[in-house]
Amino acid sequence: MKEKEIIEKTDRPITKNSLVKDLKKLNLEGEIVIVHSALSKLGWVCGGAVALIEALQEAVTDAGTLIMPAHSGDYSEPKYWGNPPVPEEWYQIIRNEMPAYRPEITPTRGLGLTPEIFRKFPDVLRSDHPCLSFSAWGKEAENITADHKLDYALGDNSPLARIYEREGKILLIGVGHDSNTSLHLAEYRAEHDLKIKIFGSSILKDGENVWTTYQDIEFNDDLFTVIGKEYESKYKYSRAKVGLAEAKLFNQKEMVDFAVNWLEKREE
């Protein structure tokens, strides 16, 4: 949405203070929360993504933990690229020459402005996966981001599982369940057919860029919208207006367990 359209939809500027007031309706203080948001859906925000991030931090407080995806999908195996694809004769050149993933400088891709700015905020930590990392701030940030394994990057050795173990929450602001990364954790845990593929990324080893391969599943988020809709019809969750957007707060463990059961029943 263009800025002119956003201004036309907004009666008065959305500010950090008004966002804090809206977010506090969700009782986020001290919670561990993974956030997915669409800044443009909030209306015209004075200070943009910075104001939203600071409002989220104030609502969660440093007794809680704020998490966002920090994925960098272009630091991945080129033969799987499709948007756009590259010629096959480029594959090996890319593998040889791709800069190594470095949490402090590697940009996010395809997530919007807010996660990209959040990863660079003071005291934000980022996990070490070269393609599917997460950023976190607050009390549990180190524990959430530590030891993010290369293999099966959104499974039981990922920040998503650390959120699950700590009874964390999922906050969707102006986005649907197609953006709900936590549902990938259910894909790994459900007893159903999974296609395993070999992926690759450039990482630093002894100061050198080294192309490293690892295993992961072929993700399928096509069903996430349906799973989320059914979950919402059966379970209680919190909702509030944040700016002009609808915000929904879910129990991550409850939703992941529901999705595991849903996927297994689908296979029967």
Image (cartoon, helix red, strand yellow):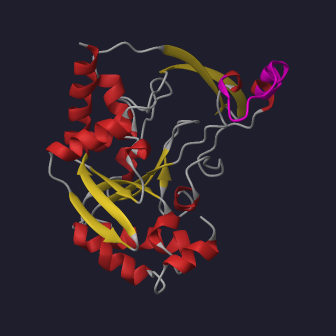
Q: Residue furthest bottom?
A: 12
User: Percent x, y for residue 231?
Assistant: 22, 41
Residue 155 part of the magenta segment: no
Q: For the magenta stretch, what is the residue range?
A: 80-94
What's the residue at 63%, 22% (across, down)?
A: 212
Q: Closer to the camera, 141 or 60?
A: 60
User: Percent x, y for residue 38?
Assistant: 48, 60
Indicate the quadrant where residue 35 lies.
bottom left
Indicate the quadrant where residue 33 lies.
bottom left
Q: Closer to the camera, 135 or 19?
A: 19
Q: Quadrant of the N terminus?
A: bottom right
Q: Quadrant of the C terminus?
A: top left
User: Percent x, y for residue 148?
Assistant: 45, 35
Q: Is residue 187 left or right of residue 203?
A: left
When the figure is inspected, residue 27 is found, relative to residue 135, above or below; the finding is: below
What's the residue at 38%, 30% (across, down)?
A: 157
Q: Is residue 235 left or right of residue 16?
A: left
What's the residue at 50%, 76% (across, down)?
A: 9
* Residue 113 seen in the current view: yes
When the figure is inspected, residue 205 is found, relative to residue 19, above or below; the finding is: above
* Residue 165 seen in the current view: no
Indicate the quadrant where residue 42 lies.
bottom left
Q: Closer to the camera, 208 or 183?
A: 183
